[in-house]
Image: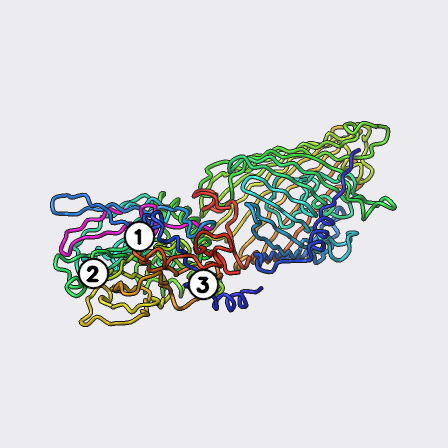
Amino acid sequence: MFRYSFIISSVIAFIVTATGQIAAEVTPEFQLGARGVMSLNTDINNDQSTNTVSDFSDTDLMFGFRQKMYNKLRGQLVIGFQFPDAESDLGQVFFHQTFIKLESRSNILKIGRSRVKTTLLDFPMLRDDDALLLTTVLNPFSDGENSEDHQYGNVLEYAHLFGQRYQLRFHAEHFRKVPEVPGTAETDFGLNAVGFIMQYRVPESQRWNRTTIQSVSIGTNNFLTDRPGFSSEYDQALKNILFGFVINLKPDPVHFWDLRSQTIYNSGFEEVQSIENFGDLARAEAIGNYTSIRYLYRKLERPTLQVALLGGYKKYPNANQPTELLQVASNLFYRIGENFDVGLQVQYREFSGDLRKIYGDNETRIQLSFIYSVDQSWNYQFDDRESLLNLEHGYIP
Amino acid sequence: MDRRNFMKTGAVVSVASLLPASFLSPEAIAAVSDRFPKPMTPILDGDVKEFHLSVDIIQQEVVPGFKFHTLAFNNQIPGPEIRVKRGDKIRVIFKNKTELNHTIHWHGMYVPWRMDGVPYVTQMPVMPGKEFVYEFIAEPYGTHFYHCHWGTLLHMQAGMYGSLIVEDHDDPIKKQFEYEREYTLIYSAHDVNFIRQELNAMLDRMKERMYLMKHGRFDKERFATFDTKDELIEAVKKGYQPPYVTNRRSPSELPQPNWFTVNGKSYPVTPNLLIKQNENIRVRLINAGTEEHYLHLHGHDFWLVCDDGVPVPQPWQMNTVRLSPGKTIDIMIEGKNRGIWTFHDHDTRRVTNNGLYPGGNLLALVYEDTPADEMELPPMTKKMGLTALPVVALDE
């Protein structure tokens, strides 16, 4: 298994201290992103018992700093933290975003802690991990105690854009290992996953120009495991293939409909034929699909009401007994102020075969939520790559 | 060094010392004419002079190394000069090549009210891809200008302006001052960040609105456009929230210009005024921007001869003239003191590029016939290995 080390942060530290200067003549653009997700979750269990908890996981705060380089590059530093899932082993606060990005018109390099490429699409759900088992490639190094292990990691990404709508993205990650290997855990930044994504995507700024296709993507995610009994890196790799698309059912500015669908195939390890724990869940052969239909009502040129119907199915063909997961969900979000939503979401999950050992027969969750998002920038100095001016009237570096 | 300290340091540098002798090179003199708006040649349709104007989005390089997206008449900033004789019949065919709405207002002209270019008052906006024909008689005499009157705060500072000169066969100023050469200087001020953000927002909004318009779905509240004031008031009573209320828009600062241009350029590529000893030149000053300018000429007085195009009863001798937004002022400069003299905004905040002095509204009155021996380089310049007084882009 090959390993690389993250050395970038130490290189930057060396430059700053080596020159002894940090120029103050360029005040960077300052970006603030915040999201508060507060919900009352009522779970209805197999035995019809219920329990209700308040949940503020996924609440996060991010700061960004961005400026032009001496050449045609732009540089950005993002630092962000979130409040992780309840009962996770991540502590009270988890730094989910800490990265530096360098980008030109057609190249993007990103290094640091950030979202990993375990999914191609975002689905219209209350929280990013609400359908994690179906929407995300699972981290086989995790013990399943939290969802962050599958969504965030130490990443090294390079993307090349062909024109404005095609991109090829190579990514390598260090996924968190739990339990930690003594002597290596917190300091181990070796890469343990690699993959790539090919994508056709119409930029968001051109949403009223895209008639049908918003995006089509295909990607791979290969975890470099220590699979017992195999020595070659190919055999040790846990291979996942992802395919996703987003199409407009009705690209109307007032009554907008779209459909999102993503299929993930996990080639699995053939020796994993029963699912006893989370490690098996991530390493067993599986194929799953998740699809959503969304209606968005936009009054006064901004979102007012969103209703979505979502569903997914996953099966484990190599399991000794038929093992399947079915999930349906529906939600409604109503905007009561700029970026302030009230939402109601209902999810039902049904498990069969080995999955019952982990999750039980079924579960229903009802969530009443309040979501407040902030996305602001100050000290603007230059335009985004995908602004309408840059896309349609010539790019200014 | 922070900006405040920098400005303090920069202000003590003599502006005159920054102007290069290379301004007198044949190439520089030849290039000067390119920095003034060129008059359009009209198409004659009987006794009507017909002009064609269009607007598109271009990139304007205001100084070497810095450009931004702008709106431009006929792909130039300022737009081409319309120069006609008093009493001429004028037709301007205006084509909108952008995805935004526009009109043209003829600033200072006695046009029929339907030709005045005020959207929703005298005409509907000229929508994307559409044309509008303006017709009027060229009255009154003098220095005027034209500009877009839709989203005026953005569209004007984004570049939609041009000079409109109405000449008289019996020019009253020529009776007072003999002159052959004249120059037009159009001043503007640009908050390039405001321009960029608002242009993007307007383009986004218009794409959405054009989609709806194409399907015949005009919505008064969505478009924030009502038939009457009473209709707006009634809509607000019923719960409609206009775009300006604080739950739709937080209080934000108005544009703070950080680039200042003369004929679409900032120092060191601003146009220079050429003059000869004992020559009179007429300079037409137009303020198409949002800032006041206090234009000061070194080494000379000049004569204010027209205010808003109107000849003043008695020319007024001065060396600093106040040019307010929307004003035009004509001055006569007498060539009485040869050399190279700066002509600049004495509110030196406008002699900056992105906050750095010198820049912006700084140009020179250049005597073409200054003897070569008077232009000899100071010894220090030679020691520095320079072949001419330098063009200074930044003050360090």
Q: Give the extent of the magenta segment.
A: B66-94
Q: Residue B306: which disc?
A: none
Q: To which chain does the residue with label 1 belong?
A: B
Picture layout, residue B311 above or below residue A360: below
Any magenta on residue B76? yes
Crowdedness of circle 1 by 10 Å Cα count: few (<14), some, many (20+)?
Answer: many
Residue at point 20% right, 66% down? B310
Q: Residue B256: which disc?
A: 3
Q: To which chain does the residue with label 2 belong?
A: B
Q: Earlier in the sequence, mark 3 or mark 2?
A: 2
The residue under label 1 is: B36
Measuring from the top left, give residue A55's x and y in whole percent. 70, 56
Looking at the rendered structure, the secondary structure element under dot 3 is loop
Picture layout, residue B313 above or below residue A214: below
Q: Are marks 1 and 2 in contact (CB under 8 Å)?
A: no
Label total for image: 3
- A380 or B205, which is in the foreground? A380
Picture layout, residue A210 above or below residue A69: above
Give the residue type at disc 3.
Answer: Gln
